[in-house]
Image: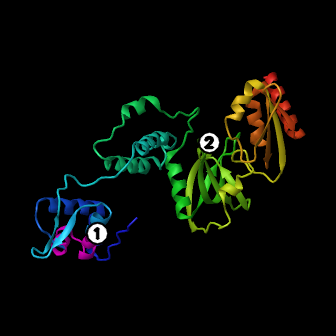
């Protein structure tokens, strides 16, 4: 994509390139013969910028622009009914509408406004005639979440800005099951939305390690005035590669779970983990094998299947599921 890097002082405060080209188009459509000097004066930019705009209009947008030496100005050699807008296929427009609906998971966060603004700008640049019934899409596609995460927008915004600006912060954080918050001095490395929930991955100075924080449990965020350099070796993908969610451990567990025919189709229809291997069983069941670094989240997942899942390996996971099931029965 061509960049418009104007170099004069006036250009720094000038109109955006698209608006300039629209003004040039309007002037040419009147039948006048403007040259680069008159256009630059009107648009308050350099003549170099005008030349670049006209080259873009002619070479990239296909507009019939030529220079008349006798009249010392540019003109259209043929009829131009309208300034060409963004070219987009029906499939791309369909994907754009679906993407706007998918923004539901960002509703209420500091990302919602800029994302919606960007999509609206693209929609406004679309051609007036497009043979796709958007009303039909509204009625046929939607996104829903089972449980919407409750976020303090001011805290979330502070976390996002601190991570982007590499600013060290002090959190007042409450662990699950506790009533009081404790101070945590952290370097916020990364904010991630995993399975519809937000998490902050940050270096905890007291524990001298990377920890995972749930924004919903953060009561306050206070900048320390210090900045940090995020390690080049930090990679969220590598960190979570052997986890079943957001918890990564130091172990190496081979997990084998057997599902009966009632649950087998649901298991086959998803990729639950990069390491997964499926083995078909006689009678319609299926066996799922995983390699995980932690058993915490897989235990909860197995319990969610009720009696349709049975842990074969490791023994410690089978015991943990059995004990949890007994506790459920006692309550």
Residue range highlighted in magenta: 36-52
Find residue 173 and report its horizontal and vertical position in percent.
64, 49
Instruction: Decide: is 325 above or below 108.
Output: above
Magenta segment's dominant SS is helix
* Labelled disc at residue 195: 2
Q: Nearer the viewer, residue 4 or 117?
A: 4
Counting residues from the N terminus, which is met first, the one under dot 1 or under dot 2?
A: 1
* Quarter residue 62 falls in: bottom left
Task: Identify the residue at image location x=10%, y=62%.
Answer: 31
Label 1 CA crowd tier, 10 Å (few <14, some 14–19, many 20+): some
Label 2 CA crowd tier, 10 Å (few <14, some 14–19, many 20+): few
Residue under numbered circle 1: 55
Left or right: 183, with 82 as reference point: right
Give the Cα separation between the discs numbered 1 and 2. Answer: 47 Å
Instruction: Decide: is 223 above or below 46.
Output: above
Find residue 246 and report its horizontal and vertical position in percent.
69, 47
In magenta segment, residue 202: no
Task: Identify the residue at image location x=65%, y=59%.
Answer: 185
Task: Identify the residue at image location x=34%, y=38%.
Answer: 131
Left or right: 66, with 143 as reference point: left
Find residue 134 and report its horizontal and vertical position in percent.
37, 35
Q: Nearer the viewer, residue 145 or 19?
A: 19
In magenta segment, residue 45: yes
């Amino acid at each position: 994509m061509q960049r418009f890097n104007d170099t004069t002082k006036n250009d720094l405060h000038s109109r955006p390139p698209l608006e300039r080209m629209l003004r040039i188009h309007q002037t040419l459509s009147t039948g006048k013969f403007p040259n680069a000097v008159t256009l630059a004066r009107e648009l308050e930019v350099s003549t170099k910028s005008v030349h670049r705009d006209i080259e873009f209009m002619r070479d990239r947008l296909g507009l019939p622009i030529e220079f008349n030496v006798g009249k010392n100005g540019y003109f259209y050699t043929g009829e131009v009914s309208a300034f060409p807008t963004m070219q987009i296929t029906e499939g791309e427009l369909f994907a754009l509408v679906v993407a706007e609906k998918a923004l539901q998971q960002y509703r209420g966060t500091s990302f919602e406004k800029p994302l919606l603004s960007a999509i609206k700008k693209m929609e406004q640049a679309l051609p007036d005639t497009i043979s796709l019934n958007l009303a039909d899409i509204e009625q046929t596609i939607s996104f829903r979440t089972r449980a919407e995460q409750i976020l303090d927008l001011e805290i979330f915004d502070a976390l996002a800005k601190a991570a982007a600006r590499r600013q060290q912060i002090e959190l007042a954080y409450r662990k699950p099951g506790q009533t009081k918050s404790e101070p945590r001095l952290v370097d916020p490395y990364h904010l991630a939305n995993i399975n519809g929930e937000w998490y902050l991955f940050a270096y905890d100075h007291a524990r001298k390690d990377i920890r995972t924080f749930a924004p919903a449990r953060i009561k306050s965020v206070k900048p320390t005035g210090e900045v940090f350099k995020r390690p080049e070796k930090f990679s969220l993908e590598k960190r979570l590669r052997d986890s079943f969610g957001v918890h990564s451990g130091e172990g190496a567990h081979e997990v084998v779970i057997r599902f009966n025919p009632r649950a087998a189709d649901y298991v086959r229809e998803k990729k639950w983990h990069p390491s997964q291997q499926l083995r078909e069983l006689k009678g319609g069941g299926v066996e799922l094998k995983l390699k995980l670094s932690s058993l915490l989240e897989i235990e909860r997942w197995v319990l969610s299947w009720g009696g349709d899942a049975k842990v074969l390996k490791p023994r410690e996971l089978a015991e943990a599921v059995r004990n949890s099931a007994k506790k459920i029965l006692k309550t």
